Amino acid sequence: MFGKFRQRLFRRSGRQLVFETRSGTQIALRGLTRRDVGQYRDHLRRLPPEDRHARFQAVVNDGTLDAHADRLDWEHALVFGVFADGVLRGVGELLPDSGGAQAEFAISVEPEFQHASIGRLLVAASLVAGRLARLTVIHLSFRRDNTGIRALARGVGAELHGSDGIVEGALHL
């Protein structure tokens, strides 16, 4: 669904935005492509078990993470990464549904980079891309105890509904 739009958005490799965190660390935001699969895989593997569970809502091992990275539809997904010192430390993903008007949002940020506004930056980039791609709704789901993503979702006006420990959210663009 995002094919041509994705090509225009990510047309120049190396195109990135550079920011400085409150702690003085320089971070760079850019779109990820299939060429980044190794860095994406490494990022997922660095997540501790509780963050893996928060991202995938299941207990996952390295093999499952590798399979996820390898089968991600890089041609249609919009994936943004935040790099610190050239190392991928956070990822935001917009995964389109088959109809193309809606997408699922997922995010992962390594623990030592949480609370540095990286999640907020990834959400903002994904929302801008979603609006430019003419999405109508972005969906997300997370564990009830994931207060970080709950705060991010509320901060951008997502409608949240929960049951059985899982919160479902919808952001109408």
Image (tube, rainbow, N blue to C red):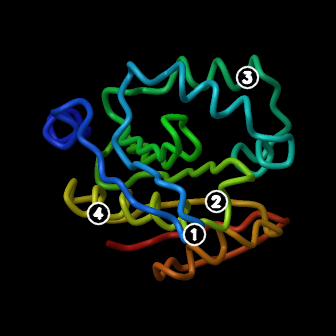
Dot 1 amino acid type: Gly
Residue 26 vs residue 41, the one in the foreground = 26
Image height check: is 20 above or below 92? below
Give me the disc on residue 169. Answer: 1
> What residue appears at the point 64 percent right and 18 percent down from the top-left corner?
67
- Indicate which disc, 1 or 2, sits on the residue closer to the N terminus: 2
Q: Mark 2 against mark 4, which lies toward the viewer? A: 4
Dot 4 amino acid type: Val
Residue 26 vs residue 120, the one in the foreground = 26
Q: Which residue is mark 2?
A: 141
Q: Which residue is mark 4?
A: 128
Image height check: is 150 above or below 113? below
* Cα distance between the residues tagged 3 and 1: 25 Å
Q: Are marks 3 and 2 in contact (CB under 8 Å)?
A: no
Answer with left or right where residue 142 lies relative to residue 157. Answer: right
CA neighbours of label 2 inside 10 A, class few (<14), some (14 to 19), many (20+) = many
Measured as percent of width and height from the top left, residue 160 is found at 61, 77
Dot 3 amino acid type: Thr
* Cα distance between the residues tagged 4 and 3: 30 Å
Q: Are marks 1 and 2 in contact (CB under 8 Å)?
A: yes
Q: Mark 4 against mark 1, which lies toward the viewer? A: 4
Q: Mark 3 against mark 1, which lies toward the viewer? A: 3
Residue 151 vs residue 75, the one in the foreground = 151
- Indicate which disc, 3 or 1, sits on the residue closer to the N terminus: 3
Answer with left or right where residue 59 lies relative to residue 161. Answer: right
Q: Which residue is mark 3?
A: 64
Measured as percent of width and height from the top left, residue 38 is found at 54, 19
